[in-house]
Image (cartoon, coloured by chain):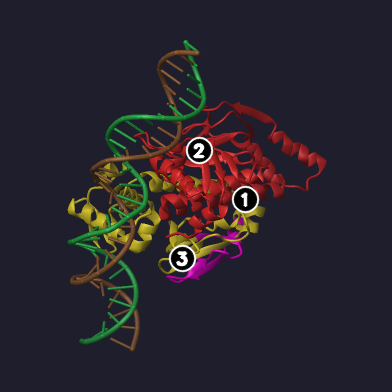
Chain colours: A yellow, B red, C green, D brown
DNA sequence: TGTTAGCTTTGACACAAATCAAACATTACT
DNA sequence: AGTAATGTTTGATTTGTGTCAAAGCTAACA
């Protein structure tokens, strides 16, 4: 959250964020069609967000972790248009959106902050579209792994070790490929000595090799 | 724009929107790396927005037409992260973002409106991700055509006739396929009597057939 | 502690879309 | 009006990823 507030102002802002909610692994934080009331700031845990077609196919839209905001999709129509599911036992701050709007009218810094969060999500999705539209399986998985370690490292975790919270199928859905292709690509990177893989555990041995795969797009 | 303002209020809001800018076909409204100052409301014409990789591959992010807003990507980092190019001679309203922020603090209706515009863009991109991640060439093109006529119809144009403002290559970039595949898929729909195609001119003969292709996802 | 259910890996084969190539149509320019 | 540049269509072939299938691994539960 942005700085530069008086004690009294901070108190008001803290009030928006005081309600907590625990979400067990596999449970829905909100679902497609639910009435929109609040944004959620993830305190601990990991979520996936996804949309589904009538015939039951799922597209994972993103994986969100501590400090990230989910629920922005609900603002347009006052109802959510995607599902947010906890991939492990998690906790979120419930932030009623009307409170956020009231306070951002009072505090320009907060207003700016909210705008940046939404814009950041738009830019993120632009990059995913590039991934899905232009890249091959290896490039997609390399980009995915690099993005993941980078975010984990920013949160104080290892630069090289990941314990995946999602299945091969969920990774595949996010990256627009089948679970078998995800598995094969993991095995290929492993054979080449770029990573070590054991089920959900991944260790990045040669990050430069991943970056090269990601940049050196055919 | 939202209603329910006094004459005086309307005047203030009008002031934000008073600067116009003409953009010739093929010219850049803004480019990746440009400093962000303003959002742009399209008055006339059509734009494409796109991102590019170092090696020069382009991913079209969207096609925007009258009444739609471009530039939201610039808010996060105070600089744009995509390109907006006019596909025909166009005119936009230049809306300095700091003015928008000032006024939305004054007028809750405007604030809400701005939030909805950003959320709508997020939801739109979610749907494109579904398209790119889960659908086959025919489904993608069917979805594209249906979306296009729907938006044109909402602006008073025909429900069945389209004059495409973009090349096969640009359509392909948007839909994650090669221009040859776009062309072949057009030909296939044409052979099946679903549409008539002559270069940039497309007439939709059986909209239900397109909807069926779009929904009846393998 | 054995059993089941869920996830992952690997193999063989099929297929949708990419690639390469050439001809054709249209538009812009001199 | 003629010519060049750009965009489009269509064909032949290749290829990356999907599909189908089976076996292996892991974790949860009775």
Which sits earlier in the primary sequence, circle 1 or circle 2?
A: 2
Residue at the image position 44 percent from the left and 50 percent from the top: B138
Q: Is residue B84 above or below residue A29?
A: above
Which of A93 and A87 lies nearest the eye of the viewer? A87
Which circle marks residue A56 in the picture?
Answer: 3
Which of A52 and A1 lies nearest the eye of the viewer? A52
Q: Secondary structure at mark 1?
A: helix
Q: Which residue is mark 2?
A: B49
Q: Residues within 10 Å of mark 2 (few under 14, many from 20)?
A: many
Chain to which the residue tagged by mark 2 belongs: B
Residue at the image position 46 percent from the left and 44 percent from the top: B186
For the record, the magenta segment spans A13-41
Q: Position of residue A177 (x, y in %)?
A: 35, 55
Q: Is residue B145 above or below residue A38?
A: above
CA–CA distance in space, label 1 to label 2 = 20 Å
Q: Position of residue D2 (x, y in %)?
A: 45, 13
Q: Position of residue A92 (x, y in %)?
A: 50, 64
Chain to which the residue tagged by mark 1 belongs: B
Task: Specify the quadrant of the image occupied by residue B102.
Answer: top right
A213 falls in the magenta region:
no
Q: Nearer the viewer, mark 3 or mark 1?
A: 3
Which of B210 and B11 lies nearest the eye of the viewer? B210
Q: Position of residue B2 (x, y in %)?
A: 72, 47
Query: Is residue A18 something one can see in this rendering?
Result: yes
A107 left or right of A47 in image: right
Which circle marks residue A218 in the picture?
Answer: none
CA–CA distance in space, label 2 to label 3 = 31 Å
Q: Residues within 10 Å of mark 1 (few under 14, many from 20)?
A: some
Q: Which residue is mark 1?
A: B116
| Residue with the most extreme right position | B7
Verify CB contact (< 8 Å) between mark 1 and mark 2. Answer: no
Q: Residues within 10 Å of mark 3 (few under 14, many from 20)?
A: few
């Amino acid at each position: 959250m942005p700085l530069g507030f008086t004690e009294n102002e901070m108190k008001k802002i803290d009030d928006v964020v005081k309600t907590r909610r625990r979400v067990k692994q596999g449970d829905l934080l909100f679902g497609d069609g639910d009435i929109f009331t609040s944004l959620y700031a993830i305190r601990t845990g990991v979520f996936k967000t996804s949309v589904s077609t009538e015939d039951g196919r799922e597209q994972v839209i993103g994986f969100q972790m501590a400090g990230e905001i989910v629920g922005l999709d609900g603002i347009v129509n006052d109802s959510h248009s995607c599902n947010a599911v906890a991939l492990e036992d998690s906790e979120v701050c419930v932030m009623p959106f009307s409170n956020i709007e009231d306070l951002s009218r009072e505090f320009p810094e907060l207003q700016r902050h909210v705008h940046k969060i939404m814009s950041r999500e738009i830019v993120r999705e632009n990059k995913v579209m590039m991934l899905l539209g232009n890249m091959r399986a290896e490039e997609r998985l390399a980009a995915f792994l690099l993005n993941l370690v980078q975010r984990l490292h920013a949160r104080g975790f290892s630069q090289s070790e990941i314990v995946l919270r999602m299945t091969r199928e969920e990774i595949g859905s996010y990256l627009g490929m089948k679970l078998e292709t995800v598995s094969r690509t993991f095995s290929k990177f492993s054979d080449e000595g770029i990573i070590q893989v054991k089920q959900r555990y991944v260790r990045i041995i040669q990050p430069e090799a991943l970056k090269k795969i990601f940049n050196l797009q055919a």
